[in-house]
Image (spheres, rainbow, N blue to C red):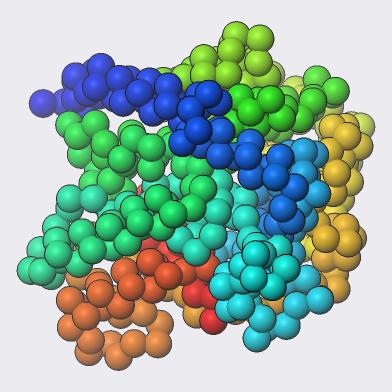
Amino acid sequence: MSVDRQQRLTAPERRAQIVQAMSHEMDRSRPSSAVARMEGLVRSGRPRHLVVSGDIDGIVSAMMLARVTDWRAIAMILGSRDVLLHPSLEETLVPSLVDSDDSADGRPRLFGVDVFSPLYDNVSNHPLRWGSKRLADVPRSRAMTEAFDEAIDRAVAQRLVVNPSQWVGIEAAVDSAAYPRSMRYRYPLGTAQLLLAVLEAADLSPRMFDREFLPWMVANCDGGLETIRSYPFNAPMWWSALGAAVGPASLTESLYQLATNQRPNQFRDVTNLLRSEEPDVARALKDNWNLADDSPGGIATVVRWLSSISGWPDPFLDGADSLREWFRIAPPRGTLKTSGRPSPPGDGDEQTAPDEALRSHLMRAASALYSSFTHYPEGVHLGWMLPR
């Protein structure tokens, strides 16, 4: 059976599972919903420190949160390689950050933005669970991956984790077009589009005063403008459901309509206008408006511009200009491909048996400062970074 036919046959079930998830998680009147819990967290006034991904999706999302809270970023994860830390911190304090309890010692707890961790509350867009796939080279892989998924499920139940792929039970290691919960049917947009919808549903919407650049920026986080064209079997289903969950007059609905009805060259025209009006900003961005690099100067340039057109605050503690004074650390990290023979983590013996290699990766990912299943052209990988 062709992939196109499988996509059509799975569409009714996929649509139903998205509708069911949105009906619960985006319903402010349900105390257990993601929206109600997010609203309660924001309105509680309890301080939080942000851990932000070092790309445009993470920065835009952090700015939205900074508009409705006094939460500010003290750490930024750069390309799943390094962590940039505020100078008030020390490398030895990174483990204690994830263990801190504001009810115990008064220090703010962490909140991840475009970052998933089982150790603290967060909003993110990548799938979290391995799923039902077995590895031929690891006979006992199913028991290990089930234990990993159970650990992730426990962490999600204990914390506020805003993640649509988790809401519908996406299985990241499964890539079958015939399976409605496979990786190819994951939530396909960025954290920014998701967070905007959640804040709107919680009556905490950040306003968009600018209509020339800002809607395009938010809509295109994580490539949303191209995604809706390239994946018509999946992206419109998710984005339209977000818009419907918030309402027909919402910003989320308007961004969905913008992406759906865009002219073929419209985003390029907006990009050319940006190059004309803000050449320094345009140089700090790629053609798809992601960051050209993760240099402090480039990030500060983009943050200043976004703040000027949105009215949203700088999301970094002491401001983005202070990023030059932040310091980088390189915590232990690793990557596990969800197919083939597992390789041991970077500090492992190359002679490590496949089952031990798999176990080591999964145990570390289940207690990571940051972990993520990401779809690359060569396959799906589980990346993790430890807090120590």
Q: Eyeballing the image, is 373 above or below 306?
A: below
Q: Quick check: 315 above or below 147? A: above
Residue 28 rendering spot, x and y as whole percentages: 55, 26
Residue at 69% in and 73% down: 105
Instruction: Compare residues 156 and 344 and report the one nearer the observer.
Output: 156
Corner quadrant of residue 181: top left
Is 335 situated above or below 200?
below
Q: Is residue 168 left or right of residue 77?
A: left
Answer whether residue 263 is visible to the viewer in this image: no
**Quadrant the C terminus occupies:** bottom right
Q: Residue at x 23, y 46 (%)?
A: 174
> The N terminus lies in which quarter of the figure?
top left
Q: Is residue 287 left or right of residue 179?
A: right
Q: Position of residue 208 (x, y in %)?
A: 79, 25
Q: Residue drawn 73% across and 83% down?
A: 90
Which quadrant of the figure has residue 179? top left
> Which residue lies at the image location 17% right of the left edge and 50% below the top edge?
132
Q: Is residue 321 visible?
A: yes
Quick check: 336 left or right of 178? right
Name of the residue lying farthest toward the top: 248
Residue, far left: 139
Q: Is residue 259 above or below residue 303?
A: above
Counting from the top left corner in percent of width and height, residue 268 is at 70, 26
Where in the figure is residue 325, as x and y percent of width and height?
85, 73
Figure label count: 0
